[in-house]
């Protein structure tokens, strides 16, 4: 029985739903907005999070209210087919195409939580997989101001200060970093000396976003040479960058292009590792089919987040606990998003916190 077949027939009763906008001002001056989705029925509530990146998409949804016709008696698979037939952006078109699977995942994850709670069981029990403690990395971008405010001038040197501050607090931490062409050989060697860089995210597969990475063959070669133990995520492949990465293809992992089994199989060479972000897949079927495929092909995975502000963060931690607990999961608790360490934070690995019912990771 496939993973999806283990949950597809779960009944779920929906009486209605509610929406709540969540917001957080971050250090670069960007306000992250997401939407908490609460499905209710049969005396239970299921929660999910819409992680679209554009605030107008969230504001339009919340202002329109719960207008989608979701009330009724369903199985999870029936409800998924219903969502496929609906316009999930009835108030205004999505700002960008990737908002559609992000919103779809918000509703499907809430439905999964509700169905499991109505059945009095947990996702772990439904799938027959015992959760384990979750290793996580701290994801950060060097060179941004440590204390908020505007972005630094382009001439401001990029330093390792953000990493060294975290390591002074907890020497066992490991990091996922976003290299840019401002990184110097001296900086990369300083980072390498810490032994704490697990993944470098080149962001070469993004287009039209504030974080697009350049296809810089000198940077790629520097990273490959000086950080020989780190995974190399999302390079933009050109003749020049392919040459820069020659001999390091086994370290290349993918994130932004991965939305389905077909996307994993379509890579230029078979990957050893991929970043599994459930919101990119959109549906429970596509996500769980991909996990089945990875297991069959012997491909590793680590989890990734979308700057969740609500229950979505716990849900990706839950998935990591089930499918890839010991890899460099980019699922750190929200306090690690702060530019400067502040307050008590749980160390890696996270203790198992799967709730006894539903699709929830108790905080």
Image (cartoon, rainbow, N blue to C red):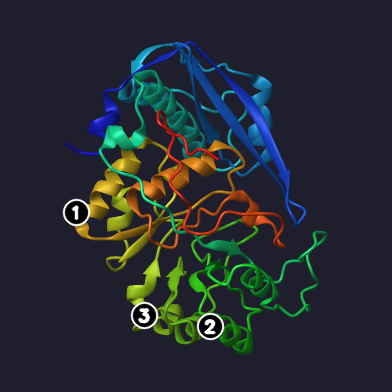
What SS does tag 1 mark?
helix
Instruction: Look at 34% across and 47% down and name the residue there.
Output: 322
Alpha carbon of mark 2 to alpha carbon of mark 3: how far? 17 Å
- Badge 1 is on which residue? 296
Q: Nearer the viewer, residue 138 or 155?
A: 138
Q: Quadrant of the N terminus?
A: top left
Q: Earlier in the sequence, mark 2 or mark 3?
A: 2
Q: Is residue 13 left or right of residue 65?
A: left
Camera sees residue 98: no
Asked if labels 3 and 2 touch by Cβ distance under 8 angstroms, the answer is no
As drawn, 232 above or below 299:
below
For residue 304, side relative to residue 184 (left or right): left
Q: Mark 3: give few (<14), some (14-19) or many (20+) Cα within 10 Å.
A: some
Tag 2 secondary structure: helix
Residue 333: horizontal and vertical position, in percent? 57, 51
Task: Report which residue position mark 3 lands on.
Answer: 248
Mark 2 and mark 1 in contact? Answer it, CB < 8 Å.
no
Q: In the rendering, at what x and y percent does residue 264 appear? A: 31, 56
- Helix, strand or loop at label 3? It is loop
Quadrant containing the C terminus in the rendered view: top right
Q: Is residue 51 visible?
A: yes
Instruction: Look at mark 2 in the image and give the residue it sits on.
Output: 192
**Distance (Cα) linking label 1 and label 3:** 24 Å
Q: Earlier in the sequence, mark 2 or mark 1?
A: 2
Determine whether 5 is above or below 245 in the image.
above
Closer to us: 179 or 314: 314
Q: Earlier in the sequence, mark 1 or mark 3?
A: 3
| Callout 1 crowding tier (Cα within 10 Å): few <14, some 14–19, many ≥20 | few
Q: Tell me the CA gap for discs 2 and 1.
A: 34 Å
Q: Position of residue 313 (x, y in %)?
A: 53, 44
């Amino acid at each position: 029985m496939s993973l999806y077949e283990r949950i597809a027939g779960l009944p779920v009763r929906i009486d209605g739903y509610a929406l709540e906008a969540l917001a957080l001002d971050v250090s670069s001056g960007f306000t992250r907005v997401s939407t908490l989705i609460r499905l209710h029925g049969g005396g239970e509530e299921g929660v999910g999070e819409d992680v679209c990146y554009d605030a107008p998409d969230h504001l339009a949804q919340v202002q329109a209210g719960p207008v989608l016709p979701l009330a009724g008696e369903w199985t999870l698979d029936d409800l998924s087919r219903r969502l496929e037939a609906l316009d999930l952006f009835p108030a205004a078109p999505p700002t960008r195409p990737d908002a559609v699977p992000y919103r779809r995942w918000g509703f499907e994850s809430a439905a999964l939580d509700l169905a499991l709670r109505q059945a009095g069981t947990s996702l772990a029990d439904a799938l027959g997989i015992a959760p384990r403690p979750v290793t996580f990395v701290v994801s950060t971008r060097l060179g941004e101001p440590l204390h908020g405010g505007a972005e630094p001038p382009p001439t401001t040197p990029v330093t390792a200060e953000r990493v060294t501050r975290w390591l002074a607090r907890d020497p066992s931490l490991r990091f996922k970093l976003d290299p840019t062409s401002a990184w110097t050989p001296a900086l990369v060697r300083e980072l390498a000396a810490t032994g704490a860089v697990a993944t470098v995210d080149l962001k070469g597969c993004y287009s039209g976003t504030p974080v697009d990475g350049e296809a810089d063959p000198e940077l790629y070669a520097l990273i490959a040479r000086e950080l020989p133990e780190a995974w190399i995520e999302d390079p933009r492949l050109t003749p020049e960058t392919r040459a820069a990465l020659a001999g390091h293809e086994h370290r290349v992992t993918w994130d932004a292009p991965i939305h389905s089994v077909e996307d994993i199989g379509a890579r230029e060479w078979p990957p050893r590792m991929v970043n599994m972000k459930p919101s990119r897949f959109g549906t429970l079927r596509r996500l769980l089919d991909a996990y089945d495929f990875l297991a069959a092909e012997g491909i590793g995975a680590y989890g990734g987040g979308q700057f969740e502000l609500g229950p979505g963060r716990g849900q990706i931690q839950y998935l990591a606990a089930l499918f890839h607990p010991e890899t460099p999961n980019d699922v750190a608790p929200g306090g690690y998003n702060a530019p400067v360490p502040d307050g008590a934070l749980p160390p890696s690995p996270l203790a198992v916190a799967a709730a006894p019912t539903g699709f929830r990771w108790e905080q």
